[in-house]
Image: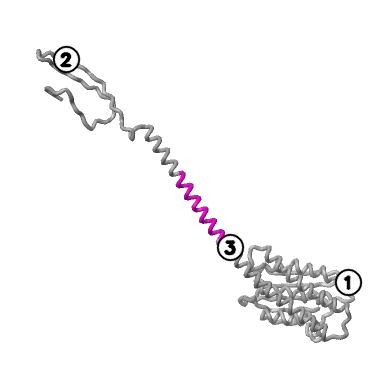
Amino acid sequence: MYTDSKNEITYTNINPGVYTLKLKSANNDNLWNEKKLILIISPPYYQTTWFYTITALLLIGLLTFLLSFWKNQIKLKERRFFLNKENTQKTVMLKEIHHRVKNNLQVVNSLLRIQSSKVKGDSTLEQKDIIGLFKDSQKRVVSMALLHERMYQTKSLEKLNIEKHLEPIIYDLINTYKVNINIKLDLNLSPIELNLDTLVPLGLIINELISNALKYAFKGREKGAISVEIKPTELNNTYILIFGDDGIGKSFEENVNDGNLGAKLINSFVRQLSGEMKRMDKSGTFYSIMFKEIL
């Protein structure tokens, strides 16, 4: 770049770096002089390494914060969803419990009413007989209580596995009523699930069948056999209960005619399940009860 009388020169748009500036000048005698200058042009702050480092750290920190915030928001939404679901389930459970308690108090009331009518209608009953009648009612209520206890121990209030529920109850009944009789029990319960509205009358039917068999079927004997089978049928929502013993063979109809309270209760619960009870042509006393799940 040539300049005549100016004492300054200007360069623009020079990138940062190290440059050598060569100056050559002449005086009035036309004598030339040459010099070299080393120029160092520093980059602006936004092009420095420390600026890049700080910016990168800030970006990483911001991304970390945003990621953590996003995760916390997801967890918060999941927690809110879980709490709402839990509250809904608790509300449903409370309503269900209220419904069950109300229904079963009505069943207990019916049992006591039938029991008290028998006491009023039979003047020959002694005090021990009356106590025995109400002990039977107590056992029926305990059977219902066991059903509810097992229901609340499960994760669902809607369905119960009949195999897991009825098997321990049946064994408890055998141990309670058998006295000195050695009972061989044959259980064949399909792993089907039924709702509580169906299981309560079904459990009470089995309770009455077993208690009646143990009271009347094996008189004068030291041992006996009882079988209980429940399985689905080919019809939709329909099941069959087959109950039998190898006892004296007293018919269900005879029990009804004799005023047997258990037999009357069985009739009532079978009707509640829209069921049909039939005597089977087998040695001993066998009955099949076709019933439907209450929906």
* Residue 217 seen by the camera: no
- Residue at label 2? 33
What's the residue type where badge 2 is placed?
Asn
Mark positioned earlier in the residue sequence (3 or 1): 3
Spatial CA distance of label 3 from label 2 is: 95 Å
What is the CA distance from the residue labelled 3 to the residue labelled 1?
55 Å
Side of 128 where 65 appears, left or right: left
**Residue 173 included in the magenta stretch of the image:** no
Magenta region, main secondary structure: helix
Label 3's element? helix
Callout 1: SS: loop
Q: Residue at x 69, y 76 (%)?
A: 240
Q: Secondary structure at mark 2?
A: strand
Towards the viewer: 124 or 274: 124
Between discs 1 and 2, the one toward the N terminus: 2
| Residue matched to label 3 | 87
The quarter of the image holding the C terminus is bottom right
Q: Please identify the quadrant where the N terminus is shown.
A: top left
Q: Are marks 3 and 2 in contact (CB under 8 Å)?
A: no
Residue 213 percent location from the top left of the image: 81, 76
- Residue 222, numbered circle: 1
> Would you identify the image quadrant in which residue 145 lies?
bottom right
- Asked which quadrant contains residue 108, the reply is bottom right
Q: Which residues are magenta?
A: 64-83
Front label number (3 vs 1): 3
